[in-house]
Image: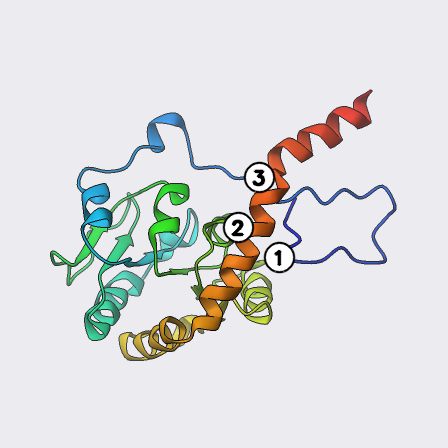
């Protein structure tokens, strides 16, 4: 259940394998709403950098959001920090660097200049669908592999968790935002992801098996 834009079919897969594409999920109905003020912020000026740690890594955020706010300030870029319901608001928030506990990825990622995230497959898929570049700071599990795939595909870069500090993050983001190849590659991957209709394809495959 992942996209051809993420990984190509392999010759050693069983013959009955179906590659459906990503199946996206934004949370329960009450979680799919934009928080107050965020839509106005997105509409007001140029595309911001969005910083998030998904649904699991956010529980061990450490100084990620504080350093992210500093990085955005160093770049002079607008930013949105999605810092989670169980964390305090980050230090360094301003009118141009704003923080919210949550926002639906499908609505905010397409408005981003770049998304900085932990590399979970759900978050990674949402960024690929949005067609914007990534800066990925993996925690564990599949996240390093996901980050390396994005780097090989030319849609983003990888930063070590222990080296995620404002200066280094700002330098890497500056490189990503100033190099048009990242945005071009991301746009090309978006077209593939959008064509796949992952949830529908998965349901079709399951129903076919049960018939």
Q: Earlier in the sequence, mark 1 or mark 2?
A: 1
Q: Nearer the viewer, residue 65 or 149?
A: 149
**Marks 3 and 2, how far apart at CA:** 9 Å
Q: Which mark is residue 125?
A: 2
Q: Nearer the viewer, residue 128 or 144?
A: 128
Among the 4 quarters of the image, the one containing residue 151: bottom right
**Which percent across, then down, holds residue 57?**
42, 54
Q: Residue at x 11, y 56 (%)?
A: 95
Which residue ends up furthest to the top in the rendered image? Answer: 211
Q: Is residue 42 left or right of residue 209?
A: left
Report whether residue 78 is seen. yes
Disc 1 target residue: 6
Q: From the viewer's perspective, is residue 135 above or below residue 21?
A: below
Q: From the viewer's perspective, is residue 162 above or below residue 117?
A: below
Q: Which mark is residue 74?
A: none
**Residue neighbourhood size for the residue with mark 2, other residues' Cα within 10 Å, grouped as few (<14), some (14–19), many (≥20):** many
Quadrant showing the C terminus: top right
Q: Residue at x 79, y 58 (%)?
A: 10
Quadrant showing the N terminus: top right
């Amino acid at each position: 259940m992942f996209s051809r834009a993420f990984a190509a079919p392999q010759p050693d897969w069983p013959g009955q394998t179906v590659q459906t594409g990503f199946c996206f999920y934004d949370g329960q109905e009450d979680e799919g709403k934009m928080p107050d003020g965020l839509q106005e912020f997105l509409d007001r000026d140029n595309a911001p950098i969005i910083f998030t740690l998904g649904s699991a890594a956010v529980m061990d955020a450490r100084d990620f959001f504080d350093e992210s706010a500093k990085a955005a300030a160093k770049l002079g870029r607008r930013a949105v920090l999605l810092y989670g319901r169980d964390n305090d608001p980050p230090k360094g928030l301003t009118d141009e660097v704003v923080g919210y506990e949550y926002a639906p990825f499908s609505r905010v990622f397409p408005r981003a200049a770049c998304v900085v995230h932990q590399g979970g497959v759900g978050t990674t898929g949402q960024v690929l669908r949005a067609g914007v570049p990534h800066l990925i700071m993996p925690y564990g599990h599949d996240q390093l592999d996901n980050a390396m795939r994005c780097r090989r595909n030319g849609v983003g870069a990888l930063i070590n968790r222990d080296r995620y500090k404002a200066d280094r993050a700002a330098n890497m983001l500056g490189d990503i935002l100033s190099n048009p190849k990242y945005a071009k590659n991301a746009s090309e991957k978006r077209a593939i992801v959008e064509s796949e209709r992952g949830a529908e394809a998965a349901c079709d495959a399951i129903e076919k098996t049960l018939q």
